[in-house]
């Protein structure tokens, strides 16, 4: 093959590229530089646009004269070729999409041949550097039919010096991009796999002896009032370095001074943090170039096991973020990135982990300006080694492995495989290079507090070498790597240079256990937690409380910001793994974002927003205890407080409370006198709003809410229609019991022990028999427990009556049924004693005593399912609303009176699942064209009103394939098990499971 084999040689990472360096753009003058827009610099030549393109299914199909190829097609640059209709999308999480045979990749290795012409007038006194900011997976570059160089590392800039190759007038630029290279073994990130030139391409005109790189180091005084700035400057020809003048401007744009010294002191500094990101502008001037670099004065350190910024403990309210869009894939504009940052700020996030690669080169500068802490992560993930075959402990008995020690050995073999790349000498330089590229590019960014060596790649000598290099190069920042918790059987881990104890998806009990062990002295970080897949984030409040208990817990980063869901071909419908004919694939495991791929806000994000609210309130004996959870800002400077006082859900008073002076992490007491009350339910709703506008948050933007229970039962009084004494007429048939009050008929099925018909004036109120309901359309978070549910037959449970009898009492009729919930091939799920109390034509009660066998798994839910006529139902209810709410996921909602319809109540998830329920309901009132229902219960209950059956939700892969039921489906639940985050996280907490072995409940139904 005529193509050099660089792409399968881990010793060849970059050929003829410039050294890794900080990202910056030169400008001709200070006025242009401070605007900091590279497109306005005359030294910047944009090569984006439509390029000639040809896709080859294999590089073996590439003709030898490809530099003279006759192109017939075009492609936009930047883009990925999969988003342009070539190849196919593929989503795989762990498994490599090719055989594990490093450093070799498949012979049938697709490639894209790119070409464009451009007119250029090079100046003989200048140098010209071409930048490719992102190419997946590797790049062979040619200019005017001459080979320039080669580079890999998809998410890092490859820069080549074209000075000696450019010509006056028309120039030809050719780039050959392969889908896979040996570097792909280090790029096994959990995302759709895409290929091509997906970030910007441009040429920079530079001085002959240009400034190659610089490193700004700041040292703050003990009192944090002044700082010494040191600049390490690197020129192409250091022996002939020109004189540099530095100009420093404060955050308000006032020039402080200029100097030619590489070290200077700044007095009365304004500190940088995520809440008040004060950025100074440093202008580096020499020759005909001016470079503008933002400086933030801040100090990150660990003392006594606590992470400190500017000598104050901070908590990361963080999220993991990919560069991702359903239309453009990996290609992200500044407008798209700003939309993400705006949403994050508006939902109280203060930190981002660039998962699992460096985000766009200018992204960190946006974080400098708008205030986000960054964990900047290297472009490394190799967890596909974890999928290499080892007999699993559960199946190992088939291979003669029977003892616990043998099974432990197998588990260790899995870990040893996991650490393969971390210890392989073939990839030592590649791992170090990727870590160095990440650090060198963003080393001058104040938002970068922590360097991450990569993600899920095991641990060993290669990462130890990289950690030592980072600590030696940049000791002022912290170093992170979660996978240091895994140890190869032939290696003793050295974690000396790692500053944090990082884990992912651990339970709150694990956090407590960490701090209960005295030898654990490093700050504790959850670099991934709260897996936001589908209807999720049920344990957000529990994690918040666990983190607040310990100064050494520095917070966490939710997985993840957005779903990865490319649009299907010629469609605006979003797909996931398997929708594109891709193999292997991991189905919808990529749909795990707080927002959808199109940035539609999901309830997971709203839950996190309120858990992360800046203030929190409690009510005690006539006082409101108000706590400021901001790290640096006084409450009175950032938040205005508005209130509503409700009596039995009716607004009786509203206004604004003067925000008291509360320093960060402190509490103030506000007197609050209760109005006269006759036992009604009193609720005080507090709204925390932005006191001032900031660049990403408007004035009065809602930052969070609290609801304080002041007095009375946390339920509204129920309404019951007046009862009219009526004579019941009772009839029996072989299969049914008919009981008639006036024009209302109740029909009971003797075989099942259920109410099978309910008619008023011969009009059916229920369209199908009433169900005892224990099933729900499985959540993504039910992915593990549902195997037990299916095995126990919960999904196909049906009722069977043992006995059924009718008793005429003084003022009503009672139908007693002893029945069970059963499933084919399984033992009894529930034993039920049910009493139907029929009072008249318009009111009845259902009393249930239930018993569950202790050995059975906890139930998804228990309640009744009503099938109502398909009509324009309006529901009015008192519960946590108006969004969906559950026993563990209701912190973004408040108790109140709300209205909805079946269609409005439904919540779309990319993969359909349980949605739209409402927790702690006092009553639900349904009204339609021909009457309605009013339902309450002996205890607060949960309800759901949907145009879809749970069977329909469970059967469809995508929400846009759902077919509405011929009925309106009303579920009224004694209890619904919680949401949790078990799709990739701890099991649902016991407190949120319906795991009782027996219970009593009563539902009360009035016909309207």
Image (cartoon, grey):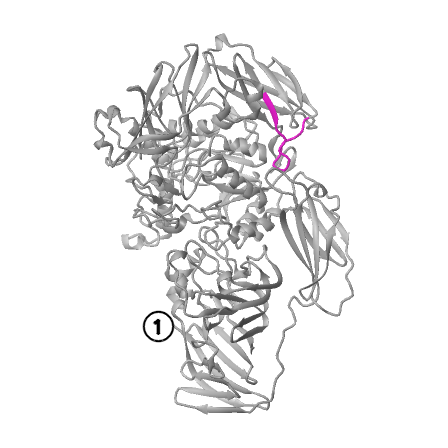
Residue 421 vs residue 61, the one in the foreground: 61
Query: Residue 397 placed where, x, y %?
Result: 30, 55
Name the main secondary structure of what is drawn in magenta: loop
Q: Quadrant of residue 556?
A: top right
Q: Is residue 57 above or below residue 716?
A: above
Residue 547 vs residue 694, the one in the foreground: 694
Query: Residue 799 placed where, x, y %?
Result: 42, 76
User: What is the secondary structure assignment of the residue under circle 1?
Assistant: loop
Check residue 274 for magenta coloring. Answer: yes
**Does 710 sit left or right of 1 as displayed?**
right
Q: Is residue 285 above or below residue 911?
A: above
Check residue 485 for magenta coloring. Answer: no
Query: Residue 949 placed where, x, y %?
Result: 42, 66
Residue 814 vs residue 26, the one in the foreground: 26
Q: Is residue 3 visible?
A: no
The magenta stretch spans which residues? 269-282
Q: Quadrant of residue 367?
A: top right
Q: Is residue 780 above or below residue 98?
A: below
Write down the residue under mark 1. Answer: 824
Looking at the image, which residue is at 75% across and 46% down?
Answer: 660
**Does 693 sit left or right of 329 as displayed?**
right
């Amino acid at each position: 093959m005529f193509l050099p084999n660089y792409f399968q040689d881990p010793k060849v990472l970059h050929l003829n590229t410039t050294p890794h360096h900080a990202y910056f753009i030169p400008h001709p003058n200070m006025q242009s530089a401070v605007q900091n827009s590279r497109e306005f610099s005359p030294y910047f030549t944009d090569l984006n646009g439509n390029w000639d393109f040809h896709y080859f299914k294999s590089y073996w199909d590439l003709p030898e004269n490809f530099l003279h190829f006759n192109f017939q097609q075009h492609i936009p640059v930047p883009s990925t070729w999969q988003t342009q209709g070539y190849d196919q999308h593929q989503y795989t999480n762990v498994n490599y999409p090719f055989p594990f045979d490093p450093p070799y990749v498949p012979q049938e290795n697709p490639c894209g041949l790119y070409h464009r012409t451009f007119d250029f007038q090079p100046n003989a006194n200048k140098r010209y550097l071409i930048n490719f900011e992102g190419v997946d997976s590797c790049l062979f570059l040619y200019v005017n039919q001459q080979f320039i160089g080669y580079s890999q590392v998809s998410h890092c800039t490859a820069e080549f010096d074209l000075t000696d190759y450019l010509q006056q007038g028309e120039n030809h630029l050719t780039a050959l991009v392969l889908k896979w290279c040996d570097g792909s073994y280090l790029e096994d990130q959990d995302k759709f796999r895409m290929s091509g030139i997906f970030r910007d391409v441009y040429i920079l005109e530079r001085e002959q002896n240009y400034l190659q790189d610089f490193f700004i180091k700041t040292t703050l005084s003990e009192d944090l009032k002044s700082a010494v700035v040191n600049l390490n400057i690197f020129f192409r020809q250091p022996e002939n370095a020109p004189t540099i003048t530095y100009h420093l401007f404060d955050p308000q744009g006032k020039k402080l001074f200029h100097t030619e010294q590489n070290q200077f002191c700044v007095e009365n500094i304004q500190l940088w943090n995520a809440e008040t990101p004060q950025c100074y502008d440093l202008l580096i001037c020499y020759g005909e170039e001016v470079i503008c670099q933002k400086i933030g004065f801040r100090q990150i350190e660990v003392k006594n096991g606590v992470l400190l910024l500017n000598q104050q403990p901070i908590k990361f309210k963080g999220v993991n973020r990919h560069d991702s869009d359903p239309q453009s894939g990996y290609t992200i504009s500044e407008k798209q990135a700003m939309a993400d940052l705006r949403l994050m700020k508006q939902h109280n996030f203060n930190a981002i982990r660039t998962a699992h690669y460096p985000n766009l080169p200018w992204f960190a500068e946006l974080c400098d300006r708008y205030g986000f802490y960054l964990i900047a992560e290297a472009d490394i993930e190799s967890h596909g080694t974890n999928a290499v075959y080892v007999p699993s402990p559960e199946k190992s008995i088939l291979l003669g492995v029977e003892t616990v020690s043998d099974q432990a050995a197998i588990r260790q073999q899995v870990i040893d495989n996991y650490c393969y790349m971390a210890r392989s000498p073939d990839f030592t330089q590649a791992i170090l290079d990727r870590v160095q590229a990440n650090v060198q590019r963003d080393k001058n960014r104040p938002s970068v507090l922590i360097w991450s060596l990569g993600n899920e790649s095991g641990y060993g000598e290669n990462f130890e070498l990289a950690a030592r290099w980072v600590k030696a190069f940049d000791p002022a920042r912290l170093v992170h790597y979660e996978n240091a918790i895994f140890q190869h059987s032939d290696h003793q881990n050295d974690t000396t240079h790692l500053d944090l104890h990082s884990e992912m998806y651990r339970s709150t009990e694990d956090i407590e256990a960490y701090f209960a062990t005295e030898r654990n002295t490093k700050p504790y970080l959850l670099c991934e937690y709260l897996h936001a897949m589908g209807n999720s984030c049920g344990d957000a409040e529990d994690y918040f409380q666990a983190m607040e208990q310990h100064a050494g817990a520095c917070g966490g980063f939710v997985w993840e910001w957005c779903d990865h869901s490319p649009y299907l071909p010629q469609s605006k419908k979003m797909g996931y793994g398997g929708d594109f004919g891709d193999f292997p694939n991991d189905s919808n495991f990529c749909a795990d974002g707080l927002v959808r791929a199109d940035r539609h806000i999901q309830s997971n994000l709203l839950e996190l927003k309120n858990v992360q609210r800046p203030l929190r309130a409690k009510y005690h004996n006539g006082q409101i205890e108000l706590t400021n959870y901001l790290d640096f800002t006084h409450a009175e400077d950032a938040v205005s407080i508005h209130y509503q006082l409700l009596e039995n859900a009716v607004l009786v008073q509203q206004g604004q409370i003067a925000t008291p002076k509360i320093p960060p992490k402190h509490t103030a007491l506000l007197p609050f006198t209760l109005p006269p009350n006759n036992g009604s339910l009193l609720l005080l709703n507090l709204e925390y709003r932005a006191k001032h506008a900031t660049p990403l948050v408007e004035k009065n933007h809602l930052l969070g809410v609290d609801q304080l229970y002041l007095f009375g039962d946390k339920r509204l009084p129920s309404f019951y229609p007046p009862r009219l004494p009526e004579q019941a007429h009772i009839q029996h048939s072989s299969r049914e019991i008919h009981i008639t009050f006036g024009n209302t008929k109740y029909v009971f099925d003797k075989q099942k022990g259920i109410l099978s018909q309910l008619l008023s004036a011969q009009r059916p109120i229920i369209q199908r028999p009433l169900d005892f309901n224990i099933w729900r359309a499985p959540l993504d978070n039910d992915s593990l427990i549902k195997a037990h549910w299916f095995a126990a037959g919960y999904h196909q449970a049906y009722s069977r009556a043992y006995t059924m009898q009718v008793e005429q009492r003084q003022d009503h009729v009672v139908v007693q049924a002893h029945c069970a919930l059963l499933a084919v091939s399984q033992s009894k799920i529930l034993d039920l004693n049910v009493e139907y109390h029929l009072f008249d034509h318009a009111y009845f009660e259902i009393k249930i005593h239930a018993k569950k066998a202790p050995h059975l798994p906890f139930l998804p839910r228990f309640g009744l399912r009503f099938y109502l006529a398909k009509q324009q139902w309006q529901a009015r209810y008192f519960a946590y609303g108006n969004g969906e709410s559950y026993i563990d996921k209701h912190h973004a909602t408040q108790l109140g009176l709300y209205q909805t319809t079946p269609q409005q109540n439904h919540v779309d998830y990319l993969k359909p699942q349980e949605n739209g329920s409402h927790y702690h309901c006092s009553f639900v009132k349904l009204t339609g064209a021909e009457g309605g229902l009013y339902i309450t219960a002996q205890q607060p209950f949960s309800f759901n009103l949907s145009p879809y059956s749970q069977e329909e939700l469970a059967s469809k892969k995508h929400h846009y394939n759902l077919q509405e039921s011929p009925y309106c489906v009303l579920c009224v639940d004694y209890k619904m098990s919680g949401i949790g985050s078990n799709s990739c996280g701890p099991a649902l907490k016991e407190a949120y499971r319906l795991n009782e072995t027996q219970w009593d409940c009563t539902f009360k139904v009035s016909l309207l």
